[in-house]
Image (cartoon, grey):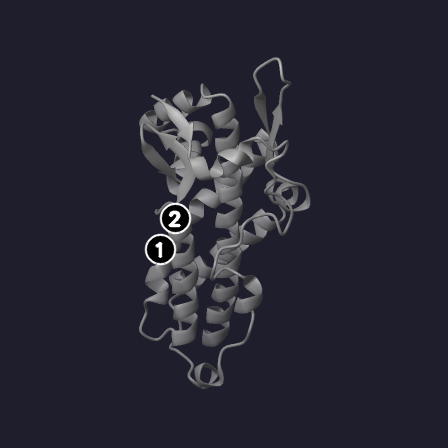
Amino acid sequence: MSATVSEDRRTRITQQRHRQGGQSGVRKLVGCEPGNLARPLSPSANDYRMSALSIDQTRRLRLFNDKADELDGSRFARALYDQQSGVIVQGDLTGPAEAVFVGPDDEAIRAFVLTIRLFQQNGDGISIQELADIYAEPGVPQDVRVEFGRVRKALNDRLDSNTMFVIDNVHLTRRRVLNTFLYGGLSHVNPNKRVVYEQWQTMGMAFALMSNEFVVTLGEFFNCVRCIRHINMRLLDAVS
C-alpha cells in the first residue's frame, strides 16, 4: 500500500500548524448555517397546520434534539470550538520531520462518537436517513422539508468529497476517513475496517493528518446535526 498527498494540498503540510479549530475554523457547509434556519415558518406555512405527528415520530424528533444537546456540552465540542485541531510538523534541516496531531484528546473523541454515530447509522430511529422518512410525510410544511433536504444534501456532498489523501492511486473521501476511524478504531469495530485503520497507523505524518481530517469532519457533521435540531424544533412547533 502506498500513500501520497495530492499536489494541490502538499504545501499545507509544511506549515508548523495545520489549523482547523476555533468556532470559525471548523469548515462550514453550505446550507448548514444555524442562523439561516432559526427564522420562523413563512406566514403561509403558519396558516397551514399539518396533522399531528405520530407519538413515535414526535419521540424520535425530540430524542434527536436531546442527543444533540448532550453533544453541545461535550468535552469534544468545547475542545474543538474553544481551542484548535491541527497538526504540528516538527523537524530540522538535518533530519526527517515528524507530525503530531493536536486537538481533542482520545477520551473526549471516544465519548463523542458513541453518541454522534446514532445520527449516522440506522437502527435507533434518529439517524439523519431515518428522520428523512418523517420529513417525507405529505403534511410536513414545504419550507421545513426543503430546509431539511438542503442540510442533508450539503452533508452528503461534503462527506463524498475527496480529502488530500491518495492511497494506491485512489482518493480517499471524507466519508471513508470518517467510517474507517469510527468503525476501525473507535467503536463497534468492523474487522475489515480495523485492518485498514491499522495500515493507516503505520503511515507516520499521513496518519497525523488523517486524524486531523477525521476530527474536522466530525465537527462538520455535528454542525449539520445542530442545524437539523433547529429544523426539528420548527417542525414540532408547526404541529403543536
**Mark 2 residue element:** loop
Question: Which residue appears farthest toward the front when viewing the image?
Answer: 93
Q: Amino acid at mark 1?
A: Glu
Q: Which percent across, then down, holds residue 138?
A: 31, 73
Q: Amino acid at mark 2?
A: Asp
Q: CA distance from mark 2 to mark 1?
A: 9 Å
In-front residue for pair 35/62: 35
The mark that comes first in sequence, 2 or 1, is 2
Q: Which percent across, then down, holds residue 103?
A: 62, 35
In-front residue for pair 21/144: 21
Q: Is residue 174 visible?
A: no
Please tell me which residue is depicted at 61% across the width and 48% down the height of the picture.
25
Q: Which percent across, then down, holds residue 195?
A: 35, 22
Q: Is residue 108 above or below residue 52?
A: above
Residue 63 tag number: none
Q: Which percent across, then down, holds residue 3?
A: 39, 25
Question: Which residue appears farthest toward the right when viewing the image?
Answer: 82
Residue under circle 2?
124
- Quarter placement of the N terminus: top left
**Mark 1 residue element:** helix
Within 10 Å of the Cα at label 1, are there few (<14), some (14-19), or many (20+) other Cα atoms?
A: some
Whether label 2 touches label 1, CB < 8 Å? yes
- The reply, left or right, for residue 51 in relation to residue 79 is left
* Image depth: mark 2 or mark 1 in front: 1
Residue 130 tag number: 1
